[in-house]
């Protein structure tokens, strides 16, 4: 598998762009909250000291109520409020009115990103970021492309911005830092699949011919850019076939690339969703679910039959992406009776799968396991429940 070329010293654009679709901003104005007047607190300050007095009180930290702050940024003079956005430390909660993100975007456009970005990132509110294009948004969307819970938002963002997003990704894709590089490469491959390789290379050309040629080499490779782990105990040719959705078998080289991507996926984390190797989810979407599940379970069985060699946590983690309900239904028993090295990781896999079947398996483990694993399963149940009810994911409308 080809190593990604490195072109050091490239810097992403510093610009922030708000790219409205035709009529979008005007339409959004119609959906702004109908708060027709200021809160009583602000009305009194305006009466005594004018808007300059309100701004002074806000800067001095004396306007703290969320409703009052929202009212200020919805109704106050734009010329006075625009300089305050960069230092407005708004932290929305689940009970907050998320329409404020839409309001400040429509009113202040690119300057609103200081407020919108941290809140959209914290609450996975991908729609709030749709019009924005800058390096931090592009990096976040490249990360979200590898997470099942946010992937739809990332795809929508890349579909909207297309090749215009490429300049924000090229420095990371050609940089030396592997985590950012792998995510940016996957994003470039994703864009190329929609827009064509020529458009992606052309968008990279302002960085120079060396960078454009390096991007072309990445797109031509189309396989994982980091070296996959050596798996001497696994005979890939002896595994069940992975079928494409049209019934054709996945070619042998593609199956080896699939295994390579699975070995490179970061997998289970404790308090955050699992991440897959960049580009893995796109590949899996082309495949038949039942054949993937059979393939993933066979990989696990081959590992166990080989004596469960250490250093292969990916073998359990890969079930996050490959297991269907039938395989998920086996994981509770696996946590209780499988090799001693895997019970806690299996509970993490179940939490990341997050389906009703997975939650039922976690509850099964919590009832049957000893004290240590029982506690872990209960923590995973709580995390899964919070994640399932995490909200709100903001739509513009």
Image (cartoon, rainbow, N blue to C red):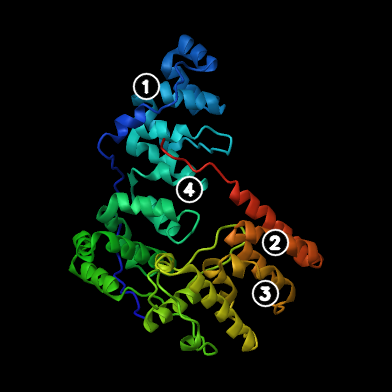
Task: State how far apart marks 3 and 2 are (Cα).
Answer: 14 Å
Q: Residues within 10 Å of mark 2 (few under 14, many from 20)?
A: many
Residue at 51% from the left image edge and 12% from the top image edge: 44
Task: Read off the residue under disc 1.
Answer: 77
Give the answer, above or below, for where 202 lies relative to 68.
below
Q: Position of residue 336 (x, y in %)?
A: 74, 72
- Crowding around mark 4 (Cα neighbors within 10 Å: few <14, some 14 to 19, many 20+) is some
Numbered badge on residue 362: 2
**Residue under the point 32% across and 59% down:** 169
User: Residue at point 35% right, 25% down?
Assistant: 78
Q: Which residue was labeled with disc 4?
A: 121
The alpha-carbon separation of the residues under discs 1 and 3 comes to 59 Å
Q: Mark 2 falls on what kind of element?
A: helix
For marks 4 and 1, give the one nearer the viewer: 4
Q: Is residue 38 left or right of residue 386?
A: left
Tell which circle, 3 or 4, labels the residue nearer the N-terminal end. Answer: 4
- The residue that mark 3 highlights is 342
Quadrant occupied by the C terminus: top left
Note whether 39 is above or below 136 in the view shown. Answer: above
Disc 2 and disc 4: Cα gap in Å?
28 Å
Q: Secondary structure at mark 3?
A: loop
């Amino acid at each position: 598998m080809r190593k990604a070329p490195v072109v050091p010293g490239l810097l992403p654009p510093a610009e922030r762009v708000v790219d409205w679709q035709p009529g979008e901003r005007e339409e959004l104005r119609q959906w702004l909250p109908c708060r027709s007047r200021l809160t009583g607190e602000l009305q009194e300050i305006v009466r005594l000291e004018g808007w300059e007095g309100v701004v002074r009180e806000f800067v001095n930290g004396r306007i703290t109520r969320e409703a009052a702050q929202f009212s200020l940024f919805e109704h106050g003079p734009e010329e006075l409020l625009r300089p305050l956005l960069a230092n407005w430390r708004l932290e929305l909660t689940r009970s907050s009115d998320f329409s404020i993100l839409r309001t400040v975007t429509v009113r202040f456009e690119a300057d609103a990103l200081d407020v919108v970005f941290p809140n959209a990132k914290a609450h996975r509110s991908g729609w709030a970021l749709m019009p924005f294009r800058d390096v931090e948004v592009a990096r976040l969307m490249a990360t979200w492309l590898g997470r099942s819970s946010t992937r739809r938002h990332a795809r929508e963002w890349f579909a909207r911005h297309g090749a215009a997003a490429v300049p924000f990704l090229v420095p990371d894709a050609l940089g030396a830092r592997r985590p950012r590089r792998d995510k940016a490469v996957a994003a470039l491959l994703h864009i190329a699949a929609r827009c064509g390789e020529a458009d992606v290379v052309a968008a990279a050309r302002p960085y120079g011919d060396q960078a454009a040629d390096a991007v072309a080499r990445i797109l031509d490779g189309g396989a994982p850019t980091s070296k996959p782990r050596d798996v001497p105990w696994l005979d890939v040719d002896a595994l069940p076939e992975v079928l494409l959705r049209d019934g054709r078998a996945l070619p042998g080289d593609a199956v080896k690339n699939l295994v390579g991507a699975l070995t490179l996926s970061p997998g289970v984390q404790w308090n955050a969703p699992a991440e897959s190797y960049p580009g893995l989810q796109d590949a899996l979407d082309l495949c038949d679910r039942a054949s993937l599940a059979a393939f993933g379970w066979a990989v696990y069985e081959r590992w166990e039959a080989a004596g469960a060699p250490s250093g292969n946590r990916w073998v359990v983690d890969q079930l996050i992406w490959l297991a269907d309900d039938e395989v998920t239904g086996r994981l509770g028993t696996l946590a209780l009776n499988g090799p001693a090295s895997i019970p806690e990781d299996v509970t993490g896999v179940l939490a990341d799968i997050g389906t009703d079947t997975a939650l039922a398996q976690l509850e099964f483990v919590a009832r049957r396991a000893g004290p240590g694993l029982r506690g872990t399963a209960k923590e995973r149940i709580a995390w899964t429940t919070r994640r399932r009810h995490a909200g709100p994911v903001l739509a513009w409308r």
